Image (tube, rainbow, N blue to C red):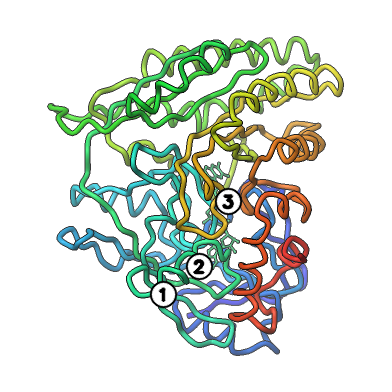
Amino acid sequence: MATSTTTPANTVTNWFGNVVSHPAVIVDAHSVDDIIAVLKNPAKYPAPVRAVGSNHSTAPCGTADGGTLIRMKMNQILNINPGGNPPTITAQADCTHLQMAKALQAQKLQFYVNTEIGSLSAGSASCAGTKDASFPGEYGQVGSYVIGVKMVLPSGELLEVTEAENPALMQLVRSSYGLFGVIYEVTYQVKALTPMHVHHTTYSLADFLKALPDFQALGYSIMYYMFPFVDKITVEFRKYNPTATGDPAHFPWVLRNQLWGTTGPKAGHDIEQNFSVPAIRYGIIDSFNAFWRSQLENVVVGDNTLPADQIIDYPPVSNDSRYTFSLFAFPEAEFPAAITDFYKFCNDYYKQKGYRSNLLYVGYRIAQDQKALLSYSWDGPVLTLDPVSTANPGWEDFLVAYNQWCSDRNGLPLLNQTPDLTPAILQKAYGSRLTQLNEARKQYDPGDRLLNDYFRVLLSI
Ligand SMILES: Cc1cc2nc3c(=O)[nH]c(=O)nc-3n(C[C@H](O)[C@H](O)[C@H](O)COP(=O)(O)OP(=O)(O)OC[C@H]3O[C@@H](n4cnc5c(N)ncnc54)[C@H](O)[C@@H]3O)c2cc1C
């Protein structure tokens, strides 16, 4: 049953609180009929109509100013098929990644891509960008393993799209950001639960760059924590370890999740509040980061850990532990130069403008992937350079400079995870693929019912 609110003063923010939207109407969708009712009744439910899941995006892709915001409330797992070829899970669009990963684990199954964010909704995963470090031979974008969706089109008609019957349309849907229709059901290809090895090593940047070519040959997925102000980088190495014996160790990921999801950002927030002199503030932050590195190296280690244990259960309403971030991906061949320049860029920016992040910077290696039209690793493997912050004063200006810096070095952004994008930056990154997406969008939504200002500007090619 739909519950709609029509107070003119509706204010909705993303999870972090820095993307604000003022829809005229908010609808909580508990059924397909609730979505159809919105799309078939433009007089009552004005455009733009945007659906959101957990609303964690760091960019305004889910905003519905003056229009209708559909908050997806359909969160049931509909089917898990361990004996399928491939095994699958089918869930309603507001099921979260953590909820599904736990249900899969109970049946000795797992996702291919286990993002650190547990709040990622199935609807978003199937039509928006994601990232996690790729295992050898696998993708690092969740949607690449989505093999079917059901959606309500702007006309109110229903459409089912599957990889088996229409791979070309699935490729478009995976980058559709809700611009083709509102997704209400998602099917993922999953696989047998496999024990996973993890360990961390800290390098100087020069030593990291020397060792980087070996990591792939050794069969590791790599994610990294960057510390440009002390010339260090800590690499998270993961590898499936099917022959592991004994009981799985949970504590390594419990500690990682506590540091990354709660203690680290809360420390950044509190240090920011209590120490106004930059040299003292950042001295304390650097010491805290040294402690963080030592925990990663010495405790977040194990030969038999569970993939789902990496997924963080973020609180539904954010608190003082919240953080935000941005992302650009760089072609693998250009990455050594990019990260070297990035360390210098962060240091120069701090010297010149007095701003640096009060947390750290992270990145992921993601395999080549053409499963989504706007895949950022379409042309080959990429590695990302992602600043993370509690949005301390200066963050917004830093992001504008960072965006241009990244674009100048052929960086590729994500429409839901890179704030402050401009049409020029997006056009440089995706070129004719953007035009292709926009042409397909017009076929499904000729009246622009689902097009908000964010996409109207960015797709105005
Ligand atoms: C603390 C934090 C940690 C994060 N960690 C990661 C991480 O490890 N990996 C990663 O990839 N990302 C991460 N993110 C980013 C986040 O996962 C992505 O932005 C993702 O889109 C969020 O899912 P969501 O359900 O909140 O999507 P939303 O923000 O609700 O929606 C994203 C987009 O999808 C559209 N959409 C959502 N549901 C539907 C639907 N049912 N039908 C049609 N369109 C729909 C929306 O309109 C919007 O355009 C993190 C974000 C935060 C704040």
> Horizontal and vertical percent for residue 459?
72, 64
Horizontal side, residue 155 vs residue 301: left or right: right
Which kind of residue does numbered mark 2 sit on?
A: Val
**In this picture, is 252 found above or below 444?**
above
The answer to whether mark 3 is within 8 Å of ligand 1 is yes
The numbered mark at residue 161 is 1
Query: Which residue appears at 57% of the width and 37% of the height?
Result: 331
Query: Which residue appears at 34% of the width and 60% of the height?
Result: 188
> Horizontal and vertical percent for residue 109?
23, 49
The mark lying in front, picked from 3 and 1, is: 1
Q: N-terminal of the two: label 2 or label 1?
A: 1
Which kind of residue does numbered mark 1 sit on?
A: Val
Mark 2 to mark 1: distance in Å?
A: 8 Å
**In this picture, is 208 found above or below 445?**
above
Pointer 2 and pointer 1: residues touching (CB < 8 Å)? yes
Q: Could you tell me which secondary element the residue under label 1 belongs to?
A: strand
Q: Could you tell me which secondary element the residue under label 2 belongs to?
A: helix
The numbered mark at residue 56 is 3
The mark lying in front, picked from 3 and 2, is: 2
Mark 3 to mark 1: distance in Å?
A: 25 Å
The numbered mark at residue 173 is 2
The quadrant of the rendered image in which ligand 1 is seen is bottom right
Which kind of residue does numbered mark 3 sit on?
A: His
> Horizontal and vertical percent for residue 183?
48, 71
Query: Which residue appears at 39% of the width and 32% of the height?
Result: 221
Q: Residues within 10 Å of mark 2 (few under 14, many from 20)?
A: many
